[in-house]
Structure formats: structure tokens, C-alpha cells
Amino acid sequence: MDTVTLSTLNAMKHRKEKIAMLTCYDATFAKITNQAGIDALLVGDTLGMIIQGHDSTLPVTVEQMVYHTKAVKQGNQHAFIISDLPFMSYATPEQTVQSAGALMQAGAHMVKLEGGLWLKESIQACLHNGIPVCAHIGLTPQSVHIFGGFKVQGKTEIQAKELINTAQELEKSGAAMLLIECVPSAVAEEITAVVQIPVIGIGAGDKTDAQILVLHDMLGLNHKPAKFVQNFMQGQSSIENAIKAYIGAVKDGSFPAMQQQYQN
Ligand code: KIV
């Protein structure tokens, strides 16, 4: 399989070819997901919950993200690697460039940050330093205490319009990719249509350019999975086959099905 770059992902969006992504935190799973044919991996700050056992992503540090990014890079062969900027590591444009630079030097091909219009300057600062950025909108888990829990976002007409406007503004400021989490399918569909950059969805319906799930969720290791999760380990004889089944379902559009989607 050819190395996946940002240009590959842009071309896939424009060909309407679905992009399959998973989170990944170590070299072994990086190797298995690559063997299965994954397009892109996210070294997510969900590692705070999945690997470290916290109840949120807030305790994760840049040093820990660097450690896991290096591990994923070691096992990676062809996939595009995105790494999360953790909580409080991008409060100013200067701090953003410093934290993002550390992740890029550890092996990331792009960094992801969570938020809204206030990210514009930081995205531009990264761009000026050669760092591509994915902006994460909708349910942004680092702001869980503002939302009062992990709740679906963009449900009212006003909230939906605000999200669509945010997506367009962040694209204008230089974001090269968007990740939308936990929003009604129709809202994610409209965002995907109005921006030119690839849109990754999680709990955001079946019309986004890419789908992502937390690796441990899709392997059935979470005993209280969210509505948008499917256990792909069911009926499979190996982890690699489960990942292949996930990739196949993303590519043919059968995942997410209606029961894994939120409506307005
Ligand atoms: O950190 C993470 O794993 C994420 C996923 C929820 C997409 O951002």
C-alpha cells in the first residue's frame, strides 16, 4: 500500500472515497492496523481514559503524547498519523507552535486541537511553521466540564448554524482537516458539503468523508460503549480481521448504520 499523505486524503474526499481511521496508542496496534489497510491513525488524547484509566482526557500531557506518538510511528508503515494536542497545551499561538512542534518531531504528520473560532490564530501560527492542523469541533471532550458531560452537540437550529459557520471559518484560517464529534447526521452532512477539506466523523452520521472510532471500542473492550460504536470483533477470529471488517464497512458505507447515528 502507498504511503498516505494529506494530498492522498484530499484526493479521496474529492473522489468520494471513504477514509477509514482508528485511534492508536502503541507500536503493536500501529503494525496490525497498517497490515489491515487503515488509511490514517489518530494518537488520541483518549489514551488518558483508555490506557491510563482516567475519567476524562484532561490529565494527559504533551510529554505523554510525544511518547505515544513515537511508539505509533515505530509500528507505522503507510498510514497518515495525526496526534492530539492535549488540554492546556495550546492556550496561546506561541504555546501551540511549541507543543505541536514536539508532536511533529515525534512522528506526527498533523496535529489536532479542539475548540472553535478562538483557534484561528493558533492554526495560522502552526501553518506558518509548516504544521498542518485538524480542528476538532462539536463535542470536544477537553471541554467536558463546560458541556456538563459527554453530550450530543448542534441539536438546535442556532447551534447547528454556529457549528457550520465555525467549520467554514476554521477552514478559511488554514485548518487542513476537520473532526466532528457527536452531532446530528444532517449537520455533519452539511459541513462535509460546504468545506473543501476532509471531514472525519465520530458519532456524526454516514455522510462525512472519513470515519474514526476508538480502537478499543471497536474491538468490544468497552463495556459501556456510546450509541455510535459498533463491536467489530463479534464473529471475527482475530484482531486484524476485526479491523479489516471495520475498514470494509467504512469503505462500503455500511458503517455507521442508522442505529449508530444521532438525528436532530
Ligand atoms: O482523542 C481521541 O481519541 C479523539 C477521538 C474521540 C476521535 O479525539
Image: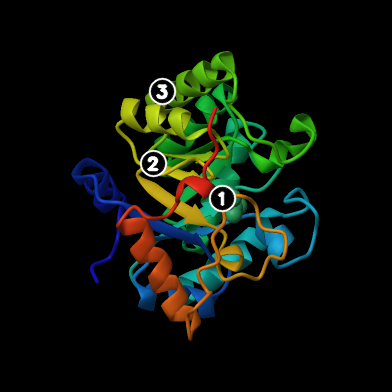
Residue 95 position within the rendered picture, expressed as x and y whole percent measured from the top left: 63, 39
Residue on which disc 2 sits: 208
Label 1 Cα neighbours within 10 Å, binned few <14 / some 14-19 / many ≥20: some
User: What secondary structure is marked by label 1?
Assistant: loop
Q: Nearer the viewer, mark 2 or mark 3?
A: 2
Residue on which disc 3 sits: 168
Q: Is residue 163 above or below residue 106?
A: above
Q: Amino acid at mark 2?
A: Thr
Q: Is residue 43 above or below residue 96?
A: below
Q: CA distance from mark 2 to mark 1?
A: 14 Å
Q: Is mark 1 within 8 Å of ligand 1?
A: no
User: Which mark sits nearer the N-terminus, 2 or 3?
Assistant: 3
Residue 54 position within the rendered picture, expressed as x and y whole percent measured from the top left: 80, 58
Q: Nearer the viewer, residue 116 or 199?
A: 199
Q: Amino acid at mark 3?
A: Gln
Circle count:
3
